[in-house]
Structure formats: C-alpha cells, structure tokens
Image (cartoon, rainbow, N blue to C red):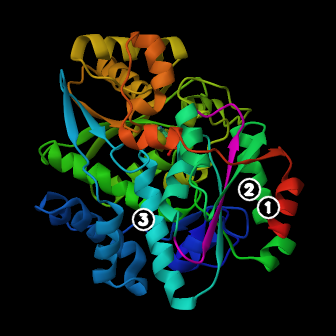
C-alpha cells in the first residue's frame, strides 16, 4: 500500500515511511492511496479483537509487517476489554476507555508505538516523538512509548487546559518522557509542532516523528472498534455511530471502516462549542479559529486537522459528506444536563466527551424518528472526576492506577507558545 499526501505534492511512500514521517513534507496529511474493500466475512466472523484488528489493518501495511508479527502487535496493543454496554432505549455505549490511560487514544498510541518499535528494531536508530496534546493524546502516547528503547518522547500541552488527572498522567512518567507546559492554547501547541517539523536544521539533527492525530498510523487501529461494535450489536443491520469529535481522527477512522465495507447507516459528529465542523457541513465554509475552552477539553479544537482527510475522502464535496454525516454542536450546559440525566435515569456516569456523543445521538434520533445507535465513549469518567463531582454532587472513586500517579512527583518545563523556543529546546536536549 502506498500513502499519498492530502496536498498531493509529495511522492507516494510506503506505510513505514508514512508512519515515521508523520506530517507529509508538503505540509499535508498522509492517506492510503486507495481503501481496500474487505471480504464481508472479516466483519461477521467470530474472532478476537486482536484478530479482527490484524485482518483489517493488514491490507494497509501489506508485506511491510509480516502477518504473524502484526497479530503479535495487535495482541500486545489491544490487551484490554472493549465492551458494548446497553444504556436502554436502543442506545448502546462502546466503552473505549479500558486501556492503561483510560481514554480511547490508547488504541492508536499503543498500536503505533509497537509498530514503530517493530521497525526500529531492524535499524537501531534513535527517534524523537513530538506530540501536542489537549489532554488525552499525550498521556496515551507517553504511556505507550514509556520505557521503549531508542525512543524519546516530548509532549506539549496547554497550561491550565488539561485536567489534574491528565496532567498527573503526563508529568509523572519520567524516563524517556519529557513534558513541556506551554503558555498558550492547544492550537498553539499544534502549530509549534507543525512548524518544528518543517524546520530543516532540526530535521537534519535528529529523527523526528509525530504521534498525534495527524499520524496515519493512528487511524488504522481506530477503524477496528467500529467493526467490533457492529458485530457486538448483532452484526446484521447498518448502525448509527455517534462520535464526540475534536480533531476528527476518530470519525475519519470510522469513515475508513465504512469504506472498507462495514455497514454504517450514518455518522453523527458531535462537537462542543468548537463548532467549525457543523458550520462547514451546513455549507457555510471552513472557518478555523481559536479554540474555546469547554468541559470536554480534549475536543477543544478550533482547526481540526483531519478535516483535510475527510474532504479528500468525499472528493471535497460537502453535499456528499452530508449524505453520510450529521453534525451538531452542544454547549457546556447541555453537556452537564446530559451527564445528570444519564446518571439519574440509567445510573450510568458518562464523562463530558461521551455526554456530547450522547447528545448527538439523541438529536439524531429525535430528528429522524430513529430508534437505535451506538455512542463512542472516549474517556473513563474518573478522568474528569473534578468536573463530574460538581454536576452529580457525589464522590467519584478513582481507579487505583490514577491514585498512584496523582501521588508521584510532577516534572515538566514551562515554555512560551513560540516554536523557536521549542526548536532550541530540542536542539540542545
Ligand atoms: C481526543 C479525544 C476526543 C476527540 O477525538 P478526535 O479523534 O480528536 O476527534 C474525544 N474524547 C476524548 C476523551 C479524547 O481524548
């Protein structure tokens, strides 16, 4: 399989190169040059999550990773349960938060880390992973690469914009993980990473790779749980998926799964107040802007980078996109009410991101007389206990892994939102 840039000015590359390069040299995002249509049996057959993953991902990698090695990688990466939990009234919740950092980004990060490790073992080079995070990506990436030989990780996050738990998860790993607290927004962090990636001097001095949602290696593993959920839900009818969106990597992976042949009735792209996509989908143009701070902070994105991939997938035709995707934005008040209502009516505690997904499905079902759907739950509620306590007015027990990291010493460097500061830091470290 060859990978091409969304900007079309980069020579096609193989999976390995797309994985390590991150952002394409022309500033675009890598996409598989075609999307293989899979045999329906892959979706309907009885198999484990790791087996399903290896079968779905194999066509995108070809012979670059042997099939048996790919299965080993999938088994190590996806070593946690992925339950589909019925909420009632036809709504089911796909819990994607049972990995080590309790958020869905573990799927992408762990697969990528192990795939990179697999290739690095072959050439013994050193690699620096550079990642901007609005909360969960950094924790998942840092955790996935922590202690791997030959790899250092540098994580940037916006000061004051991540939860206490996310911050503890990021700053207490140590070892090969360096953490930079940026005096700015997530968009600033992302811009700094993008600019540094384009810097020739830096690229000559060390091998850099990104691991956030711009890396195509993240998309592939995220397609798998859509197929897994469809099978758990009965595996006969097309289903509606409601996806809480920020950078739109999760949704893009769902669209890939649908193109591979998974029967999907419709995707709901649910956002918080950062409504660049719903506006775009209404045909009112793409107007990236500074991100707004909300309760669902991992979705505080003012310029979703995966939109370029989605536009490519739909031939830059908003009308075609509307045939498959609906999108609405929800306020923090609506999110808090949804958390409260879901808890009192169903005894289910949804984190703020999942609550936005629930609102999206609810709006869809109301507007179409629809009956059923699956909400992707992207984070464990305990990760946002500081927010949830205020809403449900009850204490939320923390899982043990979290209480442990909360108690460790936090280590980070403060930095202005300036890409030359980042460049100098990298050059001397
Ligand atoms: C990253 C994240 C999202 C948004 O996912 P995208 O792929 O960026 O759209 C939603 N919820 C949580 C908890 C996240 O960490």
Whether residue 37 appears in this view of the structure is no
Q: Residue at x 62, y 65 (%)?
A: 176
Q: Please say if the residues under marks 3 and 2 sit with CB atoms less than 8 Å apart.
A: no
Q: Secondary structure at mark 2?
A: helix
Whether residue 259 appears in this view of the structure is yes
Please report the bounds of the magenta region as a residue range: 148-163
In the rendered image, residue 161 lying in the magenta stretch gets the answer yes
Answer with left or right where residue 81 lies relative to residue 319.
left
Q: Which residue is mark 3?
A: 111
Q: Secondary structure at mark 1?
A: helix
Q: Please say if the residues under marks 2 and 1 sit with CB atoms less than 8 Å apart.
A: yes
On the image, the x and y values in percent for residue 93 come to: 27, 34
Q: Give 197 or 153, whichever is nearer the viewer.
A: 153
Q: Say which mark, if any, is on residue 193.
A: 2
Residue at the extreme bottom of the image, as rendered: 123
Q: Give 369 or 305, whichever is nearer the viewer.
A: 305
On the image, the x and y values in percent for residue 285 come to: 66, 34
Which numbered disc flags the more N-terminal residue, 1 or 3?
A: 3
Answer with left or right where residue 267 lies relative to residue 227.
right
3 up-or-down from 346: above or below: below
Q: Residue at x 44, y 40 (%)?
A: 402
Q: CA distance from mark 1 to mark 3?
A: 25 Å
Q: Which residue is mark 1?
A: 196
Q: Give 154 or 331, whichever is nearer the viewer.
A: 154
């Amino acid at each position: 399989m060859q990978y091409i840039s969304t900007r079309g000015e980069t020579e096609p590359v193989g999976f390995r190169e797309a994985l390590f390069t991150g952002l394409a040299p022309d500033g675009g995002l890598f996409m598989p040059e075609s999307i293989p249509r899979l045999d329906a049996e892959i979706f309907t057959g009885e198999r484990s999550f790791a087996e399903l993953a290896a079968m779905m991902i194999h066509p995108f990698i070809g012979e670059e990773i042997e099939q048996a090695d790919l299965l080993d990688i999938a088994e190590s990466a996806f070593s946690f349960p992925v339950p589909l939990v019925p909420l009632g009234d036809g709504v089911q919740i796909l819990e994607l938060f049972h990995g080590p950092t309790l958020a869905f980004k573990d799927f992408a990060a762990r697969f990528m880390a192990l795939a990179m490790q697999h290739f690095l073992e072959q050439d013994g080079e050193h690699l620096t992973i550079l990642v901007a995070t609005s909360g969960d990506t950094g924790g998942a990436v840092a955790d996935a690469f922590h202690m791997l030989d030959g790899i250092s990780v540098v994580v940037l996050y916006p000061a004051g914009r991540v939860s206490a738990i996310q911050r503890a998860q990021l700053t207490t790993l140590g070892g090969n993980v360096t953490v930079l607290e940026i005096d700015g927004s997530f968009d600033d962090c992302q811009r700094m990473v993008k600019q540094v990636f384009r810097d020739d001097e830096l690229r000559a001095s060390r091998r850099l790779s990104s691991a956030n949602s711009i890396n195509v290696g993240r998309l592939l593993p995220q397609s798998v749980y859509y197929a897994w959920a469809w099978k758990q839900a009965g595996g006969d009818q097309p289903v509606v998926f409601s996806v809480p969106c920020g950078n739109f990597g999760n949704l893009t992976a769902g669209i890939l799964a649908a193109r591979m042949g998974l029967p999907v009735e419709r995707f709901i792209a649910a956002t918080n107040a950062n409504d660049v996509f719903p506006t775009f989908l209404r045909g009112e143009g793409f107007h990236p802007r500074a991100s707004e701070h909300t309760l669902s902070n991992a979705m505080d994105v003012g310029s979703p980078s995966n939109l370029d991939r989605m536009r490519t997938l739909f031939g830059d035709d908003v009308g075609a996109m509307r045939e498959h995707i609906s999108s609405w934005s929800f306020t923090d008040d609506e999110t808090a009410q949804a958390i409260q209502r879901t808890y009192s009516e169903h005894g289910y505690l949804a984190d703020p991101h999942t609550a936005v997904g629930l609102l999206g499905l609810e709006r869809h079902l109301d507007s179409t007389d629809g009956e059923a759907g699956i909400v992707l739950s992207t984070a464990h509620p305990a990760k946002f206990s500081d927010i949830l306590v205020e809403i449900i007015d009850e204490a939320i027990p923390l899982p043990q892994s979290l209480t442990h990291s909360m108690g460790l010493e936090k280590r980070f460097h403060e930095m202005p939102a300036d890409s030359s500061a980042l460049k100098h830091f990298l050059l001397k470290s």
